[in-house]
Amino acid sequence: MTDCIIEISGLTKMYKSKAAVRNLDLRVYRGEIVGIIGRNGAGKSTLLKMIGGLVYPTSGELHFFNRAAAGDQSFFERMGVLIEHPGLYPNISAYENLKLLAIAYGLSDRELTVGKLLKLVGLDPKNTAKVKSYSLGMKQRLGIAVALLGSPDVLILDEPMNGLDPQGIVEIRQLILELNAAGLTILISSHILEELSKIATKYAIIHQGEFAEVISKEELQQRCEERIELETEEAREVLPVLERELNVTKYKVVDSRTVYIYDRHVHIRQIVKVLSQQGIMIDSIARHKQSLEQYFLERTESAGERHD
């Protein structure tokens, strides 16, 4: 994947003397779903507003499609943005909401476009019910339809699942995956890593306005995968024994003394037995399974210590 469509470098936003975000670097490639995760007040919304053109950065650089965004507002027209709550007219239907906005955008074939968008997000174009009677999930769907007017290249969603019931979360999640499969690049913020883990291809963990870590889905899964952590005098002596006697093929040498074993068929007692038979001393051995929430807390806590 080499098609970088968004690149931010040293992005900082100050509100008087307080930095909402500082020195953020991130590259977003075409087709990715990038999860921006952090606690409330960490800077997620500010970052997305700057990328979406709703807030100007104090310093730093924004590049879209390998060109600087400064002074060229046309780039932001290629962004579909849903930040916080969708701005909807409560006393008219979903169809009428979208049609009014389509007129304001100067879109041709408005009726066809509006009908297709509503069907895409799972709403009935013929439903004449007023938006004020909609559930929160239906309003979020309509908000996403609004963001999709104009056929953007990038969709920016700020906490789209916040406050939804379990069914609503499932529906919005499925919609996001369908939009991504159709070619949209998506940036989505949340404070719930468990939910983002079901859709994101990359994660940017933000804490106190700074990125604590940017990590791919594959890297995160590997770090949180169940494993046996083995520590011995010399890791190189252990590997041939594990491969020959226990058919271990999935492992990672962390350092000269530590090996992570990912094979599910191997038990700790088997490892202890075969290594003891070979005269190899074990300093420590334990099964490890880290939840996504634990991983997130560790990253943000370590980032917080760097600020202190």
Image (spheres, rainbow, N blue to C red):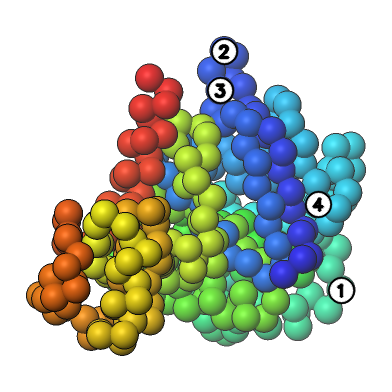
Residue 20: x and y, percent?
A: 54, 28
Q: Of marks 1 and 3, which one's residue comes earlier in the chain?
A: 3
**Label 4 to label 3: alpha-carbon separation:** 24 Å
Q: Badge 1: how crowded within 10 Å, few (<14), some, or many (20+)?
A: few
Kindly identify the amino acid type of the residue bearing the numbered disc 2: Ser
Marks 2,1: beta carbons within 8 A: no
Q: Is residue 243 above or below residue 298?
A: below
**Label 4 to label 1: alpha-carbon separation:** 26 Å
Residue 108 tag number = 1
Q: Badge 2: how crowded within 10 Å, few (<14), some, or many (20+)?
A: few
Q: Going 52% across and 55% down the picture, which residue do you hit?
A: 215
The answer to whether any part of residue 119 appears in the image is: yes
The residue where tag 2 is placed is 17
The answer to whether any part of residue 55 appears in the image is: no
Kindly identify the amino acid type of the residue bearing the numbered disc 1: Ser
Q: Going 53% across and 18% down the picture, which residue do you hit?
A: 18
Marks 1,3: beta carbons within 8 A: no
